[in-house]
Amino acid sequence: MAKKRPQTKAAAKPQITNGEIPVVGAREPCPCNSGRRYKACHGRAAAHAVTELVQRPFDGLPSECDWIALRELVPAATVTLTLKDALPEDVPSVTLATVLPMAWPALRRDDGSVLLALQNDTSSGDLSRDLADTLERALATKPGTAVRAVRVSAEGPRLQDLLDPAAPFEPVVHSGFEFWVPSTAEQATPEVAASLERANAAAIPTVKLSSVDSAYWCETPEKNHLRWVMPHPEEKLLDALARLHAAGTSTLGEGTRLVGSFRAHGLIVPVWDLPSAMGAEECEKPAAAFAERLADALAADAPLTAEERRSRGGLTNRQVTLS
């Protein structure tokens, strides 16, 4: 028989204060002074209060696949954003960044420009609405100020309401996070400098392919990978990948292997293992050739064969949901 666990004292109840409890990082102490981490205290209540989970928060934005890649896969990248309305006179530019120092949601630089972080935790079920709220607050805050996280109203605008849908979305992938402090005139504080050093040490070398859309090569100590965010409906894409896998044409060349996929923000991200000697440039032609094979497989409408169904089951079993 299993032994009974010793009884413990009940956890202390949150010391609720007057006014709204501010949002902080999940692992930080809860501002209500309960002594517990935020995620186990008022952060849990905030999570339970979410009534709507938007599966595809970037749907309708130009380059939805690249938004997902920058949110989930790419360590260091920036993109210049164009708003539907004119920027305030004292805001020269708005730039999307994968992450910012100290996990800031956004930063208004000394020169008035705005950096908006994409990879932060959010307070609601709609990532697009959370980012739009942060962006609006960043535009209105004073220069030289970091924007903090807050709970977002369900009635606020979304990125789709603020960004120009006709503007290009062109990610620039960086080898590190030096873009946090782009000039000698803007010196990093000791905290930011330490955060920069940690971030640079953890960054995985990543390159965006130019021959196909939304495919990112990355280097790890044991092997390299290609992670490719694809816009096709999930069931149709899995069928097409299964057809190619069963036919032995799902690879990107000798020593490569389609190992599975992620599901992220409503889209599928196939992943290939690559030899350590295969760099990003060596992926360009094989990726373009695979895109042509995939297009043919997506156009096929015959029922899957028994072998193709087995391939599909293997791919599905190796699928991981990121968000």
Image: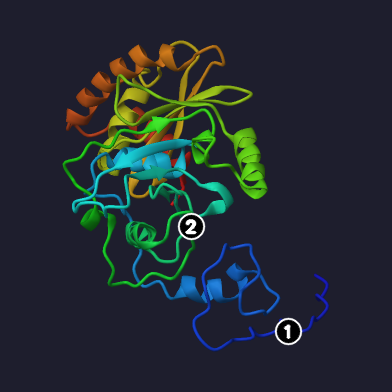
Give how far across and how far down residue 106 sits, in percent. 45, 54
Q: Amino acid at mark 1?
A: Ala
Q: Could you give the CA–CA distance between mark 1 and mark 2, rounded to whole angstroms?
A: 41 Å
**Vertical placement of residue 187 versus 293, above or below:** below
Classed neighbour count for the residue bearing mark 2: other residues with Cα under 10 Å, few (<14), some (14–19), many (≥20): some
> Closer to the N terminus: mark 1 or mark 2?
1
Q: Quadrant of residue 304?
A: top left
Q: Nearer the viewer, mark 1 or mark 2?
A: 2
**Residue at left offset 25%, top offset 45%:** 82
Disc 2 element? strand
Is 140 left, or right, of 193 in this rendering? Answer: left
Front one among 263 and 75: 75
**Vertical placement of residue 138 versus 292, above or below:** below
For residue 310, say whether it is visible: no
Which residue is identified by label 1?
10
Figure quadrant of the N terminus: bottom right
Give how far across and how far down residue 75 sits, in percent. 50, 37
**Residue at left offset 34%, top offset 57%:** 139
Disc 1 element? loop
Give how far across and how far down residue 186 sits, in percent. 53, 42
Residue 145: numbered disc? 2
Q: Quadrant of residue 267?
A: top left
Q: Quadrant of residue 310?
A: top left
Is 298 left, or right, of 260 in this rendering? Answer: left
Front one among 166 and 128: 166
Front one among 140 and 289: 140
Classed neighbour count for the residue bearing mark 1: other residues with Cα under 10 Å, few (<14), some (14–19), many (≥20): few
**Vertical placement of residue 68 versus 34, above or below:** above
